[in-house]
Amino acid sequence: MSVKQVKKELATKDGRRWIFYIRAEDNMGIKKKYNSKKYMTRKEAEEAEKEFKIKMAKKELNLSDMTFKDLWEEFYDYKMDKVKKNTLYGYRKNICRLEYFMKIKIKDLSIQDYLFWRSTIVKLPLAVKTKNGYYKLLKAILNYGVKWHDFNFTSIYNKMEKFTDPNGMVKEMKFYTPEEFKKFISCEDELQFITFFKTLYFCGLRIGEISALTWEDIDLDKHTITINKSLSYIEGEYYTSRPKTKNSIRTLPMPNSLYEDYVKFYEESKKYYNFKNSWYVFGQTKPFSGEYLRKRKRRIADEAGVKQIRIHDFRHSCASLLINNGANVMVVAKYLGHAKIDVTLNTYSHLFNNKMEDIVNLVDKVYTEEQTETDMN
């Protein structure tokens, strides 16, 4: 019997976990594995399997004669044990913008459908990044159909393009200069938050990375912080997953002032009843919520009389600090955990342009000194 129960974490919201799976021929006579939708009980899955086999025997079922909704549901089930929970959450969040396609049969899906959908999305007062999230999901679903059902979307693919805004202004990147950060941190009076903001500023961690830190990741003997996981808050629950990329797994040395804070903070933390090294560094048994941290950051910035920046902008501040003090692009990329150097260059190109001016000034200075020596001789 090809009926099984999937893992608990792969269940639907209402608790359906039973599926049946079978190898069946598509219209081209090619045998492919078919996974059913999820059912509440084993019995329901077994009955559905019997009905499926009967229809197959009578040639009443056409696997390729499915709607976009069928393909979406199959795609989502397929991805459930292959991507992070926050990625699945993004799928669920964005699928509402693909509602137009749901009742269309895959065999009838045309370029006109895509162009009509695109025209409706273009008019929405949303960021280009948000619109491209819908675009990426649509393309991922179509790609799944090509891979597992041999659907041909060439006529659509050739005309699909990401959304752009030709009149859009590039957002100015905000960050704290060392002077601004000194003002900011001078108004923070709790050691754990002094340590939190200094870690963000000096180490450039993402919010998910710093939230996931436990005392097991802090090596006070070696003066290092190890980033090997990320924390997400999705639909009322915390989830720990691997970092954003393989390169995001890294061990960073602590500046002396930060190391001293961690030593004092660790001694304070150990005084709590039942303290364990598995506790979160910032939050003990539960991490601090993003909203709580944002409120505290806003209050401290107001008290310090410095501009408001996002939590993520402390990461940009770290990059600025490194680049403006002579770090090369490879070091910055490794320090920040970027997947490729291109990401670093694309994100901080304006900062590196400033360093290019320094190089030109250096060349001019060297040339002038050499010319002066020649003239004197």
Image (spheres, rainbow, N blue to C red):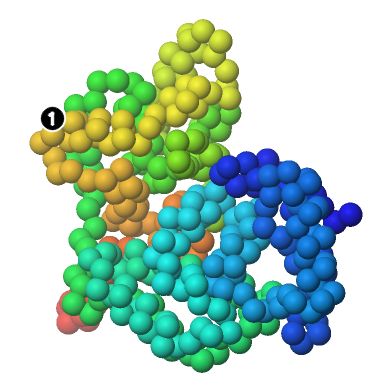
On the rendered image, what quadrant is the C terminus found in? Answer: bottom left
Give the percent coordinates (x, y) of residue 242.
58, 47
Q: Is residue 239 visible?
A: yes
Q: Quadrant of residue 64?
A: bottom right
**For this view, does 281 lie left or right of residue 348?**
right
Q: Amino acid at mark 1?
A: Glu
Q: Which residue is mark 1?
A: 303
Residue 84 is left or right of residue 313, and the answer is: right
Sort mark 1 into few (<14), some (14-19) or many (20+) by Cα contacts within 10 Å. some
* Name of the residue lying farthest toward the right: 1
Give SS at disc 1. Answer: helix
Q: Residue at x 47, y 25 (%)?
A: 286
Q: Residue at x 26, y 68 (%)?
A: 124
The image shows a total of numbered marks equal to 1
Image quarter in which the N terminus is found:
bottom right
Q: Would you say 92 lies left or right of 97 here?
A: right
Viewer can see residue 334: no
Most foreground residue, 149 or 286: 149
Res 349 quadrant in image: bottom left
- Image height of 292 relative to 363, above or below: above
- The residue under the point 82% across, 76% down is 58
Q: Is residue 284 above or below residue 148?
A: above
Q: Is residue 372 above or below residue 289?
A: below
Q: How far from the left and from the top, in percent, is residue 291?
A: 31, 35
Give the x, y percent position of residue 344: 40, 63
Residue lying at 42% horizontally and 20% vertically, measured from the top left: 265
- Which of 206 and 240 lies nearest the eye of the viewer? 240
Return the x and y of residue 263 as percentages of the image width and height. Answer: 45, 21
> Is 75 or 327 nearer to us in this picture?
75
